[in-house]
Amino acid sequence: MGGMTPAPRHRLPPSDAAPQGDTPWAVFFTFLQLGLTAFGGPVAHLGHFRQALVVQRRWLDDRQYADLVALCQALPGPASSQVGMALGLWRAGRRGALAAWAGFTLPSALALMALAWGLGRWGHTLNPAWMQGALHGLKLAAAAVVTHALWGMARSLCPDTPRRLCLAFTAVVAWAWPQAWVQVALMAAAGAAWVLWAPPAQPAAPVPTPTPLRCPLSRREGLGWLAALAALLLGLPLAMTVWPGMVLAVVDAFVRAGALVFGGGHVVLPLLQAEVVPNGWVSDSAFMAGYGAAQAVPGPLFTFAAYLGAALAPVASDLNQAPLWLSALAALGWGLLALLAVFAPAWMLLAGSLPFWEQWRQTEKALKAISGINSAVVGLLAAAWVNPVLSSALLSVGDAVLVAAGWGLLHRGRWPAWAVVGLACGVGAVLGGLGSL
């Protein structure tokens, strides 16, 4: 049909798509364990996945796992979550992909939604000095974590002069004009520039061809998912002109952010900040406190979207004086809406790419475009590092010293991010309390 050849070589019959016959519930509980214990960011998550699923459960071998990780790192979105979705898809079909995502994502998402609801409900009424100090400590921790991420990403993704110049240019333009459309244009321009002018990549040393991880999705379905994502990105702004309202505005903002995050979870910071802070949905202070808290919970960094959704619930629902149960329900609803919206593109891109991966990975233009886009997203993170990260966190020389100390613990001491967040929060609470005496 449609000129397609039957039974492409990279697909197996449905019975081979889940060779162990796992149920979605089995996949869910497997990933729930990871969602409760996988601290440390995307790179650490992939290490946890390998230990649990390659070494212990032997779902796949190391070469298959490396092949899958390579695909997910080349796509926009949260790489560790996409790896989990792909493994859930392979083990238990489409419901298995949903189960893997839910198990890995919900523990941290629910914790961050509870934090946002509590801060929105009582943060401005109780307002003790120690609480404000703890929140300021979270912002300082976020500044240290972003500094560390920016340092590492700049070294790995911008190793030569052209990419460093792209980083600098992108950072200056994004800092001067922090609108979301400017960020999208900068990434698109960098990708196009590298496709047109970058020299060919040096061929890698030949390696044995691994046994591919079989994809249970057809190419037709893959094209359908990509078309659905394109329809969302193009249709949501048009729909808002016909049905203006907060729900569509939130979905549009978070879908767009989720579809454009190249280069790691930290790049979601400038994209989401440009969507929620200028609109008055979330304050700069609450935004940075939540981003700091997101470093201290296990699971994907994209669950920060759940915090933002819950934090904007009072603005969206006008429930500041509502009963506790009603405000909690509103925070849960808006948090889940933002969470689903930011993760939806990750699944659509993964499902759309898996059937074509073996062919696409050999394309020189695709590899060159990714190289250019990655240098631009480091520039976007650099602009966000200046504003709002440092501008909202550094209120004194002492704050700068604490941020530098946190970066030193992450970079030199190899401390995990959650430990630095806990220390900064504790130090902030103590200093805040002492300052009130």
Image (spheres, grey):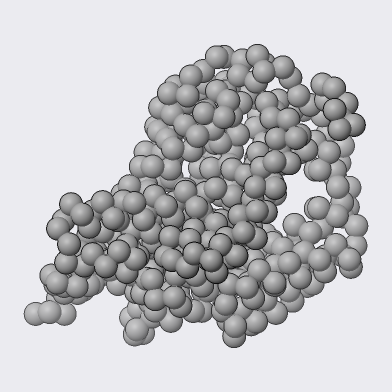
Position of 384 relative to 152 (above/below): below
User: For the view shown, which residue lies furthest in the left direction?
Assistant: 437
Q: Nearer the viewer, residue 430 or 271?
A: 271
Quarter the C terminus occupies: bottom left
Q: Quadrant of residue 316?
A: bottom left
Return the x and y of residue 324 as percentages of the image width and height: 16, 56
Position of 430 relative to 342 (above/below): below
Q: Quadrant of residue 321?
A: bottom left
Q: Residue at x 38, y 42 (%)?
A: 106
User: For the view shown, which residue lies furthest in the front direction?
Assistant: 242
Quarter the N terminus occupies: top right
Q: Nearer the viewer, residue 169 or 426?
A: 169
Position of 227 relative to 101 (above/below): below
| Left or right of 294, for residue 132 | left
Return the x and y of residue 227 as percentages of the image width and height: 70, 47
Residue 10: tell me if it is visible. yes
Return the x and y of residue 31 as percentages of the image width and height: 45, 32
Return the x and y of residue 240 as percentages of the image width and height: 53, 66
| Left or right of 363, for residue 264 | left
Position of 90 relative to 162 (above/below): above
Q: Quadrant of residue 433?
A: bottom left
Q: Nearer the viewer, residue 341 or 168?
A: 341
Q: Residue at x 48, y 61 (%)?
A: 248
- Give the total number of marks visible in the rendering: 0
Q: Nearer the viewer, residue 347 or 127?
A: 347
